[in-house]
Amino acid sequence: MQDNAPSHASKYSTAWLARKGIKEEKLITCSSQSRGVAILIHKQLQFKCTRMVKDEDGRTLLLLAEIQGHRMILSNIYAPNIDDPTFFGNKISDMGDYPILMAGDFSLVMDDILDQSTPSHARTNSIYIIHASLRQHH
């Protein structure tokens, strides 16, 4: 029998995660089955969430957390597949000046040289917003 991860949050997902060593999950979903993000924390980490910011559409989850005694921002983003720099806005900078771990699906090419799976694209406005946020939280 194969132990597959649940594709969407269910009453069984917490038990599955516990078997995989996940201590805590921060999960947001919406009524649509097409989106939702989560941040999973391994049970062996010393973890404390001091602030959580999420959007109603299930596309953004930001945690100001203390992990192993270090404060940082954890971010999981599922961006719309259009160039919408207002989507990224000041969400991350509003969390404070801490190191950031940013993950997710940004629905854009961040680096034309590294991502050669698609033809070269013009740099979008969203890329500039993301890069500015990352530089601020080096």
Image (cartoon, grey):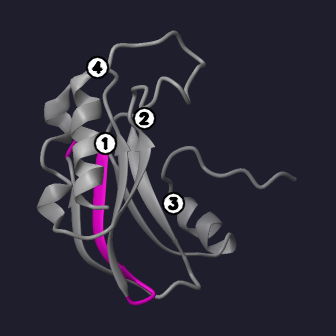
Task: Give, as a three-letter code, the residue at label 3.
Answer: Lys
Query: Magenta residues?
Result: 56-69
Could you say where residue 96 lies in the image, as x and y percent from the top left?
A: 16, 68
Residue 32 lies left or right of residue 57; in this view the side is: right
The quarter of the displayed image where residue 31 is located = top left
Which of 33/68 is in front?
A: 68
Query: Residues under labels 1 and 2: Cα distance?
Result: 12 Å
Check residue 11 in the rendering and tell me which mark sits there, or answer none. Answer: 3
* Label 1 residue SS: loop
Residue drawn at (55%, 26%) of the image: 115
**Pointer 2 local density, CA inside 10 Å: few below 14, some 14–19, many at least 20:** few
Q: Residue furthest right?
A: 1
Could you say where residue 73 lies in the image, as x and y percent from the top left?
A: 31, 66
**Pointer 1 local density, CA inside 10 Å: few below 14, some 14–19, many at least 20:** many
**Pointer 3 local density, CA inside 10 Å: few below 14, some 14–19, many at least 20:** few
| Mark 4 lies on residue | 82
Residue drawn at (21%, 55%) of the image: 92
Task: Give, as a three-letter code, the residue at label 4.
Answer: Ile
The quarter of the displayed image where residue 65 is located = bottom left
Is any atom of residue 58 visible in this view?
A: no
**Disc 3 versus disc 2: nearer the observer:** 2
The quarter of the displayed image where residue 72 is located = bottom left
* Label 4 residue SS: loop
Do callouts 2 and 4 mark residues in contact (Cβ within 8 Å)? no
| Mark 1 lies on residue | 59
Query: Residues under labels 1 and 4: Cα distance?
Result: 14 Å
Task: Give, as a three-letter code, the residue at label 1.
Answer: Arg
Task: Give, as a three-letter code, the residue at label 2.
Answer: Gln
| Mark 2 lies on residue | 33
Could you say where residue 4 lies in the image, as x and y percent from the top left?
A: 72, 50
Give above or below for 72 relative to 34: below
Task: Please tell me which of labels 2 and 4 falls first in the chain.
Answer: 2
